Image (spheres, rainbow, N blue to C red):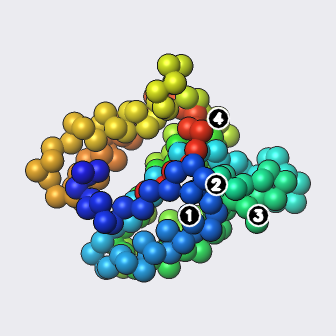
């Protein structure tokens, strides 16, 4: 029931399915299907790299998909520029991006225009597990990440009687309070919803 989002409107890419091409295609399909009163929600748990700090001559943030190669990030991972290129064209009401990965907030630093131009949309929100210069960590017991577990806990406390957009708003509002104190790490495989 995922915050009242119908299952036929959810694309879940896990493990080897979460290739660069598949992620970009899923984002493009979401943009094409979303109407002016709809919202797009993107959730990614995996590895994130702010390449400008690690790879000479690059200045972008990358979500490492299952086929990502650290020596060829621009061709094999999903960059902030890639995401902005797809989601920046959306004419939907809003976009919520949840990143559970190292250096996740660097996405906003490398795709700022997406957050400034709100065509008809009402919101563009990035909720990251960590700051641009931080690493995140998995739970010691191996039961996922602190960030994702906190989001799930918050989601279970949101009243189901609310419409889907209000459930997500309540989730984000509650999670922001949680995210301030939570340090997390990535899961073994990237996911996108």
For marks 2 and 4, the one nearer the N-term is 2
Which dot, 4 or 1, sits closer to the camera?
1
The residue tagged 1 is 23
- CA gap, disc 2 and disc 4: 17 Å
SS state under label 1:
helix
What is the x, y in percent for residue 161?
A: 11, 50
SS state under label 3:
helix
- CA gap, disc 3 and disc 4: 21 Å
Is residue 116 in view?
Answer: no
Q: For the point 46% across and 52% down, which residue is it?
A: 43
Q: Indicate the quadrant where residue 124 lies.
A: bottom left
The residue tagged 3 is 74
- CA gap, disc 4 and disc 1: 23 Å
Q: For the point 46% across and 27% down, which residue is it?
A: 143
What is the x, y in percent for residue 89?
A: 50, 79
Which dot, 1 or 3, sits closer to the camera?
1
* CB contact under 8 Å: marks 2 and 1: yes
* CB contact under 8 Å: marks 1 and 3: no
């Amino acid at each position: 029931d995922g915050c009242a989002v119908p299952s036929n409107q959810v694309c879940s890419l896990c493990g080897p399915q979460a290739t660069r091409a598949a992620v970009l295609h899923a984002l493009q399909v979401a943009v094409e299907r979303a109407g002016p009163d709809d919202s797009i929600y993107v959730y990614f748990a995996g590895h994130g790299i702010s390449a400008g700090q690690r790879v000479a001559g690059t200045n972008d943030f990358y979500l490492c998909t299952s086929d990502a190669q650290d020596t060829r990030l621009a061709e094999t991972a999903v960059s902030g520029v890639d995401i902005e290129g797809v989601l920046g064209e959306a004419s939907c009401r809003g976009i919520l991006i949840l990143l559970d990965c190292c250096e996740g907030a660097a996405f906003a630093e490398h795709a700022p225009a997406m957050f400034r131009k709100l065509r008809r949309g009402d919101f563009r929100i990035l909720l990251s597990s960590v700051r641009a210069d931080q690493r995140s960590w998995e739970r010691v017991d191996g039961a996922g990440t602190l960030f994702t577990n906190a989001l799930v806990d918050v989601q279970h406390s949101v009243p189901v009687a609310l419409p889907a957009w209000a459930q997500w708003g309540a989730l984000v509002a509650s999670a922001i309070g949680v995210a301030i104190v939570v340090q997390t790490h990535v899961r073994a495989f990237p996911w996108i919803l």
